[in-house]
Amino acid sequence: MDQQIKADIVKLVENSRDAIVCSIDENGYPNAKAMFKANNEGFRYFWFSTNTSSLRTRHWLERPVACIYFVDPVGIHGLMLTGKMQVLTDDDTKLSFWHPGDEIYYPLGPTDPDYCILRFTAEKGNYYHGLKKHLFSVDELEES
């Protein structure tokens, strides 16, 4: 992959607080929602926190296929990553992502049964900028 394109992708992900996260519902329709990016490890793994009782959590428990999308509307950059979403409910994982103030969303604290962590594992990507799209595997992006 071209090093400038990779640098642009890195900048887009690093400067994005939010991502559009998509699931597939019980009728096969895509559902999208903006979510705070809790963390990422390169371009392979991305973490988000949400409610265990949420609609999308139920979707991913039934169908783990997902995509996430980062966008810079000013620079007209977009990055879509496709892969699988895993719902993590173990206390160690939840504690590792807990931040003071999260009680607003999860009043019982880090062990709240309605608090979970989503881990997205990316497989493929599509980066759009300058009227061009760049299709790639995440392995290719991480190796370059």
Image: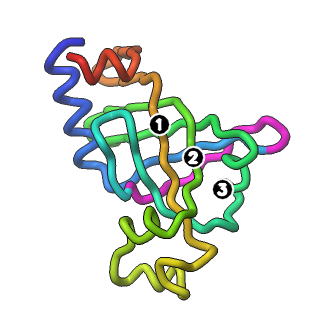
Q: Residue at x 15, y 18 (%)?
A: 3
Q: Earlier in the sequence, mark 2 or mark 3?
A: 3
Verify whether residue 32 appears in magenta: yes
Relative to residue 26, is residue 86 drawn left or right? left
Tags 2 and 1 touching, CB below 8 Å:
yes
Q: Residue at x 32, y 41 (%)?
A: 72
Q: Nearer the viewer, residue 107 or 130?
A: 107
Amino acid bearing label 2:
Gln
Mark 2 = which residue? 86
Helix, strand or loop at disc 2?
A: strand
Residue 7 position, x and y percent, is: 16, 28
Amino acid bearing label 3:
Thr
Marks 2 and 3, how far apart in space? 9 Å
Q: Residue at x 53, y 80 (%)?
A: 106
In the figure, residue 27 lies in which quadrant? top right
Amino acid bearing label 1:
Thr
Mark 3 = which residue? 57
Relative to residue 63, is residue 135 drawn left or right? left
Relative to residue 34, is residue 55 drawn left or right? right
Magenta residues (range) = 26-37
Q: Nearer the viewer, residue 43 or 128?
A: 43
Number of on-image labels: 3
Mark 2 surroundings within 10 Å by alpha-carbon count, few (fewer than 14), some (14 through 19), many (20 or more): some
Marks 1 and 3, how far apart in space? 15 Å
Relative to residue 15, is residue 111 drawn left or right? right
For the residues carrying marks 2 and 3, which lies nearer the camera in this image? 2
